[in-house]
Structure formats: C-alpha cells, structure tokens
Image (cartoon, rainbow, N blue to C red):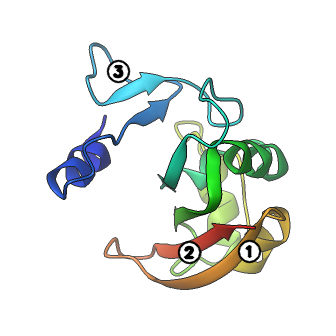
Amino acid sequence: MGHEVVAFRKFGYTDTIGIDINPGKNNPYVIKGDFHKTKFNNESFDTIYTNSIDHVWNLRIFSKEINRILVFKGKLILEIDHLLKKTKQRRKEWIKKPSKYESLIYDSLNDIKKQLKEFNFIDSFPSAHEGFLIAIFEKK
C-alpha cells in the first residue's frame, strides 16, 4: 500500500516509488508491475529495497532484473521474513496456507546469497520487525 514509500520520502528520498502486482486502487505511492520484469530503464536506481522476497517466483530471474536496473555498486536491501523465528517445518506450514501468497521458501540467508550471483553480500542484522532479517547486497 506504500507505507515504506511514505517512510523513505519522509527521510528525504523524494524519488522513491513502490512496485506491486496489486498496488491497490488509486495508490499514489505504488505502481503496477512485476519485480521479475520491470519497465524501468537500465541502471535507473541507486538503491532497491524489498520486504517481499518471499513472493519471488524465481530468485535468479529476480536477481538478473534487479542487477539490470541498479547502477554499478548500487545497493539491494532485503527485509527477509521466515528466517529468525520460524523453524523449517513452520515455514513450510506457513507457505501452504491458502490465504498466503508466499512462493519461495529458504532455510537460511545462504540459500538466498547463492542465487544473487550478480551481487556481493555486505551485511545482515535483525530488522525492527520481529523475526525479520535485513540483508544488504551490492551490485558487482
């Protein structure tokens, strides 16, 4: 719905825009789109943030697309759920819920790092959201 966009704009990042398959009706902060194949020009962004990595259908396609639209040495910031609090079994149960949209399951940050071949891992730390992890990558 654009809450993250509003937060980034309040901190001075006025060009921030969100992208979502379902941005909501008349949403001024989020445009309709798919992060597997965006309509943005090559090297359009210095930084990309997502808290939707669990909605990625294919990490390799996602990684290549983010690589395409990030500038050299641009940052990819992932806020990752399902790593710090849920066991492997609980993650599988969560994803099988019919009301959920998660499509990707991972057991560790290393699972994600292996697929993001276009990026160097920089750092990770617990998010302010309980059970989430922030991981920062840099475009090679």
**Spatial separation of the CA atoms under disc 1 and disc 3:** 31 Å
Could you tell me which quadrant the N terminus lies in? top left
Secondary structure under tag 3 reads loop
The location of residue 49, given as percent across then percent down, is 48, 55
Q: Which amino acid does label 3 sit on?
A: Gly
The location of residue 129, given as percent across then percent down, is 34, 71
- As rendered, which of 102 and 12 lies closer to the eye? 12
- As rendered, which of 93 and 78 lies closer to the eye? 78
Q: Sequence order check: which comes first, mark 1 or mark 3?
A: 3
Q: Sequence order check: which comes first, mark 3 or mark 2?
A: 3
Q: Is residue 9 left or right of residue 33?
A: left
Q: What residue type is labelled 2?
A: Ala
Secondary structure under tag 2 reads strand
- As rendered, which of 1 and 67 lies closer to the eye? 67
Q: Which of marks 1 and 3 is in front?
A: 3
- Give me the residue at 47% from left, 33% from top: 19
Give the residue pinned by disc 1.
Answer: 107
The location of residue 97, given as percent across then percent down, is 59, 45
The location of residue 17, given as percent across then percent down, is 37, 36
| Residue most extreme to the left | 10
Secondary structure under tag 1 reads loop
Q: In which quarter of the image is residue 31?
A: top left
- Give me the residue at 28% from left, 21% from top: 27
Q: Is residue 10 above or below residue 33?
A: below
- Give me the residue at 52% from left, 64% from top: 77
Callout 1 touching callout 3 (CB < 8 Å)? no
Give the residue pinned by disc 2.
Answer: 135
Q: Residue 24 carries which label?
A: 3
Q: Can residue 32 be seen in this view?
A: yes
**Spatial separation of the CA atoms under disc 3 and disc 2:** 27 Å
Q: Which amino acid does label 1 sit on?
A: Asp
Q: Nearer the viewer, mark 3 or mark 2?
A: 2
